[in-house]
Image (cartoon, grey):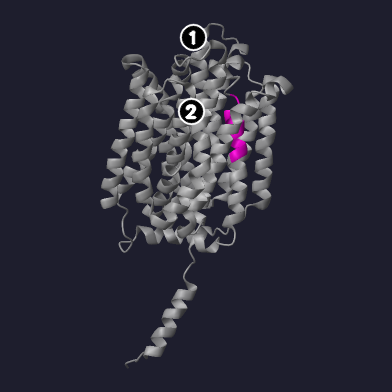
C-alpha cells in the first residue's frame, strides 16, 4: 500500500521539526547576557585589582619572607608575579571545555571562590616558596576574567559580541590600572598581610554577586546532543589554519605589550628623570597603555561588529606597530607616556575582535574550549614577553626592544591579512 504525503503535510512536518529542535545557547540566554555582562565586568575588575595590587609592595613582601639580597628579591618577585599567568595559561583550555559540558556560570563561581581562598592563604604565607606556589595555584584554579570571556563570548548575539567583549575588556583593563594604585595605599592602612585579606574580601563580593545575579539557561542534554551533531560528517570543519593564526596573533599581541615591562624603569632613568622619581613615573608610564585601551576598547569592539573583525585586527596591528617604534627615540618621559596612550588606544581593538572570531571559528558546542585556548595563548604571551624583552634589552640595547616588538606586530598584521583571505 502506498501512502501519499501532501505538500501541506510536508510543511507541517518541517515546522514541527523546527519547533522541537533544541535552541542554541546564545538564543536561550539572550534575555540574560546584558545583566551577566555587568556582573562579569565588576567581577573581572575586582579580581584583577586584587591580583595586580601587590605589584608596588611585592619586593617588600618577598624581603619580609626571608629573602635578603637585592638580586634574589628581584628574581623571586618576577617568578611570583609570573606564576599566576603561567597557571592560567595551563588550565584555561580545561576550564573552557568544562564550561561547554557543565555551563559557564559554575566556572565563574569556581574561579571567584577559589581565588578568594587562595588570596587569603597568600596573606599567611611563611616563605617565598609558599608565595610562589600559592600564586601558581591562583592561576590554576582562578581565571575569573577568562571565564567571563567564555560566558559573554558565547551568550552575546553575534552582531553585538564585539561591543560586549570590548566592554568586558574595559573592566579588566581598569582593574589592572587601578590595582597598583590601590596597592600603594592599602599596606599603610592594613599592613602587607592585611592587604591580601582585603583583596580576598573584594573577590568574595564578586563571588556573591555572581552566585545571586548571574543567570544561565544551560541544558547538559542539549550540550551533549550538540556535540554529537558537531562530530557528524554534515558539520563543516573549522579552518585550523585560521584558528592557529588567531591564537598566534593573540599571543604575539600580549608578548609585544609585555616585552617592554622589564626595561621601562631603566629606560625612564635615562630620560632626564631624577632617581627619586623614577619609580613613580615608571608606574604612570606603565599605566598609560591601559588608560588608552580603556578609552577605545568598547568603541573598537562595536566597530568590529559593523565593518568586520578582520579589518579592525589588521589596521590595529599596523597602527600599534607604528606607534611602538617612535618610543625608541623619545627624549622626555612625557613623550613616552603619550605614545603609550596612543599604543593602548590601538591595542584595545585586537583582543575583543580576536575573541569574536575565535567564537565563530568553531561550533557553538566547542566555543568555550576555543576561547579557553585563546586565553591560554594570551597568558602565554604575558609570561614569555617580559623574558624575551629583557634578553633583547641586555644583548642589543634598550632601544632595540621597541624595534623588535614593532616588527613583531607588523608581521602579525601580515599574518592576519593572510588569514582574512582564507
Q: Circle 2 sits on which residue?
A: 337
Q: Image check: 417 left or right of 74?
A: left
Within 10 Å of disc 2 (Cα), the crowding (few <14, some 14-19, many 20+) is: many
Identity of the residue drawn at 41% across and 89% down: 8
Q: Report x, y in % for residue 325.
A: 35, 29
Q: Report x, y in % for residue 87.
A: 49, 31
| Magenta run includes residue 214 | no
Q: Are marks 2 and 1 in contact (CB under 8 Å)?
A: no
Q: In this view, does 272 lie above or below 251?
A: above
Distance Cα–Cα, label 2 vs label 1: 28 Å
Name the residue nearer the viewer: 48 or 6: 48
Within 10 Å of disc 1 (Cα), the crowding (few <14, some 14-19, many 20+) is: few
Query: Which residue in the rendered view is the most extreme toward the top?
Result: 69
Among numbered discs 2 and 1, the one appearing first in the sequence: 1
What's the magenta region? 45-54
Q: Name the mark on residue 71.
A: 1
Q: Can residue 2 be seen in this view?
A: yes
Q: In which quarter of the image is the N terminus?
A: bottom left
Amino acid at each position: 500500500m502506498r501512502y501519499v504525503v501532501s505538500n501541506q503535510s510536508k510543511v507541517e512536518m518541517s515546522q514541527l521539526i523546527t519547533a522541537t529542535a533544541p535552541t542554541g545557547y546564545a538564543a536561550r540566554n539572550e534575555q540574560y547576557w546584558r545583566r551577566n555582562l555587568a556582573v562579569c565586568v565588576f567581577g573581572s575588575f575586582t579580581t584583577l585589582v586584587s591580583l595586580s595590587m601587590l605589584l608596588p609592595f611585592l619586593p617588600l613582601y618577598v624581603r619580609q619572607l626571608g629573602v635578603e639580597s637585592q638580586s634574589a628579591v628581584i628574581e623571586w618577585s618576577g617568578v611570583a608575579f609570573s606564576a599566576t599567568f603561567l597557571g592560567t595559561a595551563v588550565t584555561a583550555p580545561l576550564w573552557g571545555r568544562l564550561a561547554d559540558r557543565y555551563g559557564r556560570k559554575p566556572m565563574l563561581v569556581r574561579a571567584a571562590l577559589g581565588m578568594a581562598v587562595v588570596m587569603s592563604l597568600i596573606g599567611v604565607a611563611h616563605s617565598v616558596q609558599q608565595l610562589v606556589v600559592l600564586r601558581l595555584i591562583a592561576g590554576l584554579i582562578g581565571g575569573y576574567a577568562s571565564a567571563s570571556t567564555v560566558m559573554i563570548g558565547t551568550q552575546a548575539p553575534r552582531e553585538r559580541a564585539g561591543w560586549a567583549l570590548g566592554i568586558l575588556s574595559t573592566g579588566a583593563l581598569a582593574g589592572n590600572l587601578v590595582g597598583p594604585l590601590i596597592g600603594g595605599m592599602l599596606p599603610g592602612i592594613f599592613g602587607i598581610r592585611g592587604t591580601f585579606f582585603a583583596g580576598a574580601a573584594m573577590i568574595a563580593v564578586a563571588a556573591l554577586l555572581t552566585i545571586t545575579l548571574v543567570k544561565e539557561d544551560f541544558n547538559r542534554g542539549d550540550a551533549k546532543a550538540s556535540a554529537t551533531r558537531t562530530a557528524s560528517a554534515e558539520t563543516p570543519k573549522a579552518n585550523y589554519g585560521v584558528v592557529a593564526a588567531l591564537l598566534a596573533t593573540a599571543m604575539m599581541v600580549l608578548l609585544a605589550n609585555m616585552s617592554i615591562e622589564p626595561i621601562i624603569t631603566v629606560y625612564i632613568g635615562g630620560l632626564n628623570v631624577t632617581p627619586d622619581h623614577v619609580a613613580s613615573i615608571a608606574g604612570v608610564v606603565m599605566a598609560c597603555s591601559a588608560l588608552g585601551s580603556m578609552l577605545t576598547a568598547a568603541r573598537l569592539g562595536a566597530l568590529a561588529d559593523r565593518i568586520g573583525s578582520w579589518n579592525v585586527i589588521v589596521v590595529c596591528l599596523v597602527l600599534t606597530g607604528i606607534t611602538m617604534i617612535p618610543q625608541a627615540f623619545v627624549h622626555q618621559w612625557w613623550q613616552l607616556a603619550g605614545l603609550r596612550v596612543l599604543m593602548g588606544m590601538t591595542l584595545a581593538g585586537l583582543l575583543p575582535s580576536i575573541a569574536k572570531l575565535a567564537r565563530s571559528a568553531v561550533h557553538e558546542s566547542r566555543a568555550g574550549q576555543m576561547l579557553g585556548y585563546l586565553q591560554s595563548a594570551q597568558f602565554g604571551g604575558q609570561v614569555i614577553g617580559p623574558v624575551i624583552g629583557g634578553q633583547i634589552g641586555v644583548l642589543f640595547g634598550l632601544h632595540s626592544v621597541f624595534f623588535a616588538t614593532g616588527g613583531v606586530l607588523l608581521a602579525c598584521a601580515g599574518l592576519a591579512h593572510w588569514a582574512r583571505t582564507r
